[in-house]
C-alpha cells in the first residue's frame, strides 16, 4: 500500500472510529468558588508554551498531509480556520513530503493560507537532524513536533519494529534545530519517567497525547488480517498523563491532548498542569460536517466556554487557572495513587 493511500485510510478510519473515550477528565472536578471576584470581560486566555506565546491555549493538533488532494483540502481549510482565530496549528508527519516532493503542497498550503500564524512542523522519532531541518524549512515553522507512536507502528502491518536510539535522535534535533521541539504521543500518554528523559534530552514542550481521543491501534487493526486488539485499550489516560508529566522537576511546558472536546475540558487540562490544549479528532469531525466556518465557530465557542469557567473559578489568567483547586476521583485517582502521585496537591492548593 502506498503512503498516500495509508494517509487517506487514516482519515477515513479516524472519522468512523471517533473518540475512544476514557480520557479521565470526567474524574476531575473543580472546587466551586462562590466569591470569584472576577469579570468575564477581563479574563485573559493568552498563554506560553516553551518559547512560544499564543493568543489562546487552543491548538489545532496534527492530523494529516501527504495523502493527495483530500489531505491538501483538509490542511487548507484548517489553516484558514487557524488564521481566522489566531490558533496555533500542527501538520501531520511530513516524512511523505521529504520522500516525495510531489506531495509537498499538501503541507505547504498551511503556510500559504496562514502566512503569519504559529505553525508546527511534524516528523516521527526516526527523523534525522537534516530531515528535521528540512521539515521546519518547508513550512517556515515556529516549532517542530516529533510524534511518538510505538503502539501504532507495532499494530500497523507495514510499521516500524525497531525503536532504538529514539532519545539520542531527539536530543540531537533539540540541540541543532533552532526552533522549540515538542514531543507528542499519539494517543497512549506519556509517563513521568519518559517525561524526565525527554526533558534531559533538551525537549522544552511535551504533548501528553493521552488515551481517550483518536485510537490509532483501533485504526491500524482495521488494516490487519489478525488484529492485535489488546493494544486498543492500551495507554495512560489524558488526565493521568498530564499529572504524570507535571511531576517532572525539569522545566517543561505541557500540552494536554487526547479526547478534548470543549472549553471545560481545556480548563481541566490546564488546571492539571498543561499550558495549552491540542484538539484534532473533534476538529476533523466538525470540519467534515460544517467546513471551515464550522471550525472557526467551534474554536470561538471553546474560547468563550473557557473564559466562562475561568470567571466562575476566579482565575483571570492561565497562570491562576493552573493553581485552581480541583478534586480527582475514580480510576484517575487510583492510577495516580499507585504511581506515587498524591492527588492532594491539586485539592488543597
Image (spheres, rainbow, N blue to C red):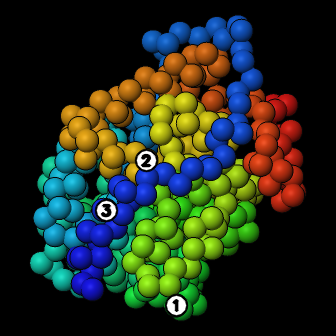
Q: In this picture, is 261 found above or below 98?
A: above
Residue displayed at 85% across by 31% down: 348
Residue 300 horizontal/vertical position (percent): 35, 28
Distance of mark 2 from mark 1, alpha carbons? 28 Å
Distance of mark 3 from mark 1, alpha carbons? 23 Å
Quadrant where the image shows the C terminus: top right
Q: Circle 2 is placed at which residue position?
A: 279
Q: Which mark is in front, 3 or 2?
A: 3
Q: Is residue 83 left or right of residue 52?
A: left
Q: Foreground: 224 or 94?
A: 224
Q: Circle 3 is placed at which residue position?
A: 11
Q: Earlier in the sequence, mark 3 or mark 2?
A: 3
Residue displayed at 43% across by 47% down: 279
Q: Which mark is in front, 3 or 1?
A: 3
Number of disc labels: 3
For label 2, count other residues whose C-alpha is less than 10 Å away and answer few (under 14), some (14-19) or many (20+).
many
Residue 161: image tag: 1
Amino acid at each position: 500500500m502506498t503512503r498516500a493511500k495509508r494517509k487517506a485510510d487514516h482519515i477515513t478510519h479516524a472519522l468512523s472510529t471517533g473518540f475512544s473515550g476514557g480520557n479521565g477528565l470526567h474524574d476531575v472536578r473543580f472546587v466551586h468558588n462562590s466569591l470569584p471576584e472576577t469579570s468575564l470581560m477581563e479574563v485573559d486566555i493568552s498563554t506560553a508554551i516553551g518559547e512560544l506565546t499564543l493568543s489562546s491555549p487552543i491548538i489545532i493538533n496534527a492530523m494529516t498531509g501527504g495523502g493527495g488532494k483530500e489531505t491538501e483540502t483538509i490542511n487548507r481549510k484548517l489553516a484558514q480556520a487557524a488564521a481566522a482565530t489566531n490558533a496555533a496549528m500542527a501538520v501531520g508527519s511530513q516524512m511523505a513530503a521529504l520522500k516525495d516532493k510531489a506531495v509537498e503542497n499538501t503541507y505547504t498550503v498551511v503556510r500559504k493560507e496562514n502566512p503569519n500564524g504559529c505553525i508546527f512542523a511534524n516528523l516521527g522519532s526516526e527523523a534525522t537532524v537534516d530531515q528535521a531541518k528540512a521539515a521546519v524549512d518547508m513550512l517556515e515553522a515556529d516549532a517542530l513536533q516529533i510524534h511518538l507512536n510505538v503502539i501504532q507502528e507495532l499494530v500497523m502491518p507495514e510499521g516500524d519494529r525497531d525503536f532504538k536510539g529514539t532519545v539520542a535522535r531527539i536530543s540531537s534535533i533539540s540541540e541543532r534545530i533552532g526552533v522549540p521541539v515538542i514531543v507528542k504521543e499519539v494517543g497512549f500518554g506519556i509517563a513521568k519517567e519518559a517525561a524526565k528523559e525527554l526533558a534531559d534530552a533538551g525537549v522544552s514542550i511535551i504533548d501528553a497525547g493521552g488515551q481517550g481521543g483518536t485510537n490509532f491501534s483501533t485504526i491500524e487493526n482495521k488494516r490487519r488480517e489478525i488484529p492485535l486488539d489488546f493494544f486498543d485499550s492500551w495507554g495512560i489516560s489524558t488526565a493521568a498523563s498530564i499529572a504524570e508529566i507535571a511531576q517532572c522537576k525539569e522545566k517543561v511546558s505541557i500540552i494536554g491532548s487526547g479526547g478534548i472536546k470543549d472549553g471545560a475540558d481545556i480548563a481541566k487540562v490546564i488546571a492539571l498542569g498543561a499550558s495549552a490544549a491540542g484538539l484534532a479528532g473533534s476538529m476533523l469531525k466538525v470540519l467534515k460536517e460544517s467546513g471551515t466556518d464550522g471550525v472557526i465557530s467551534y474554536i470561538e465557542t471553546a474560547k468563550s466556554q473557557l473564559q466562562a469557567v475561568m470567571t466562575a473559578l476566579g482565575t483571570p489568567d492561565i497562570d491562576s487557572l493552573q493553581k485552581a483547586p480541583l478534586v480527582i476521583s475514580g480510576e484517575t485517582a487510583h492510577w495516580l495513587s499507585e504511581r506515587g502521585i498524591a492527588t492532594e496537591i491539586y485539592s488543597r492548593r
